Amino acid sequence: MNQLSTHFALEEFTTSQSAARLGLDNTPPPEVVERLKNTALGLEMVRALLQAPLHINSGYRSPIVNKAVGGVPNSQHVTGEAADIICPGFGTPAEVVRAIVSNGSIPYDQCILEFNSWCHISFGPLNRHQALVIDHDGTRVFA
């Protein structure tokens, strides 16, 4: 198993039920693996903040997998900068987003409560600290 950080392995970021079901390759190129290492380090900070293990629902998506699952073409999942996570040992996805956003010390790019079911968090070169909600009503600022 290729460890990206203390608690996160490459396999956690690349396992995709959709890719397996459709027979699609989801192997990241070397430059994406380097960005995944940075994402894993960001998730280590989130894990330390929440004091509980994280589960990655979706990490890296190859362009073909991203298209198959209906992801936007410029998704940070394709660049290795994003992960969709849950943290059952801490609380609901909304509580996870609130903890990350209110902490102020985690250098995230976007932290999004998606459909009240998971937290999308990305760590990119900009680290814009965008906190959003996406659901059936659209996209808005997380409050």
Image: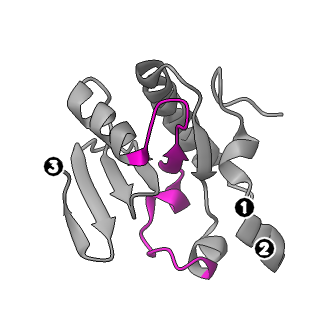
Look at mark 2 in the image and give the residue it sits on. 24
Q: Residue at x 43, y 52 (%)?
A: 120
Q: Secondary structure at mark 2?
A: loop
Residue 113, quarter of picture: bottom left
How far apart marks 2 and 3 lie (CA) works out to: 38 Å
Q: Nearer the viewer, residue 25 or 51?
A: 51
Query: Of label 1 and label 2, which has the lower sequence position?
Result: 1
**Taking 67 as reference, is 127 left or right?**
left
Q: Secondary structure at mark 3?
A: loop
How far across and how far down the image is residue 125, in percent? 34, 43
- Position of the N terminus, as image quadrant, is top right
Question: Alpha-carbon distance for marks 3 and 1?
Answer: 31 Å
* Disc 3 target residue: 143
**Magenta-colored span:** 68-93
Q: Nearer the viewer, mark 1 or mark 2?
A: 1
Q: Residue at x 78, y 73 (%)?
A: 24
Q: As shown in the figure, which amino acid type bears the numbered disc 2?
A: Leu
* Residue 16 image label: 1
- Badge 3 or badge 1: first in the primary sequence: 1
Q: Are marks 1 and 2 in contact (CB under 8 Å)?
A: yes
User: Tag 3 or tag 2, which sits nearer the N-term?
Assistant: 2
How many numbered marks does the figure carry?
A: 3
Q: Residue at x 43, y 49 (%)?
A: 119
**Which amino acid type is shown beneath numbered disc 3?**
Ala
